[in-house]
Image (cartoon, rainbow, N blue to C red):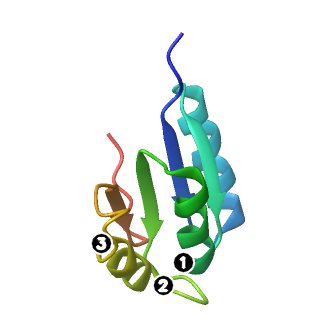
Amino acid sequence: MSEKKKVLLVDDDPDFVEAVKVIVESGGYDVRVAYDGKEGLEAVAEEKPDLIVLDVMMPVMNGHECCAKLKGDEATVRHRFLSYCLPLWLTG
């Protein structure tokens, strides 16, 4: 059996995090969460996710700052990012 792909969800809204986590986990992914950019950086170092879903507007460190730090680090530059800014949320 293959190992589940890891998704890191970084957002400061706990209700949104829980809702998205349930949806993504139902797709067979292992979901980790962080509630600001600083926690997100720490989680990337520990978890080494395959995909990072990153909010833009957060306390402590916003999504732009977090993304810039990750892209500037040789160890994390390979990560795929999905960045979003609410209230724009597209559904299919």
Q: Amino acid at mark 3?
A: Lys
The Cα–Cα distance between marks 3 and 2, rounded to whole angstroms, is 14 Å
Secondary element at tag 3: helix
* Mark closest to the chain's N terminus, 2 or 1: 1
Secondary element at tag 2: loop
- For marks 1 and 3, give the one nearer the viewer: 3
Q: Is residue 61 above or below residue 12?
A: below
Q: What residue is rendered at 35% in x and 65% in y? A: 83
- In what quadrant of the picture does the C terminus appear? top left
Which label belongs to residue 37?
1
Which label belongs to residue 4?
none
Q: What residue is rendered at 53% in x and 27% in y? A: 4
* Mark closest to the chain's N terminus, 1 or 3: 1
- For marks 3 and 2, give the one nearer the viewer: 3
69 or 13: nearer the eye? 69
Q: Give residue 34's quadrant in the image.
A: bottom right
Q: Mark 2 highlights which residue? A: 62
Task: Indicate the position of residue 27 as horizontal and vertical percent values.
Answer: 51, 27
The Cα–Cα distance between marks 2 and 1, rounded to whole angstroms, is 6 Å
Q: Amino acid at mark 2?
A: Asn
Which label belongs to residue 71?
3
Residue at the top extreme of this rendering: 1
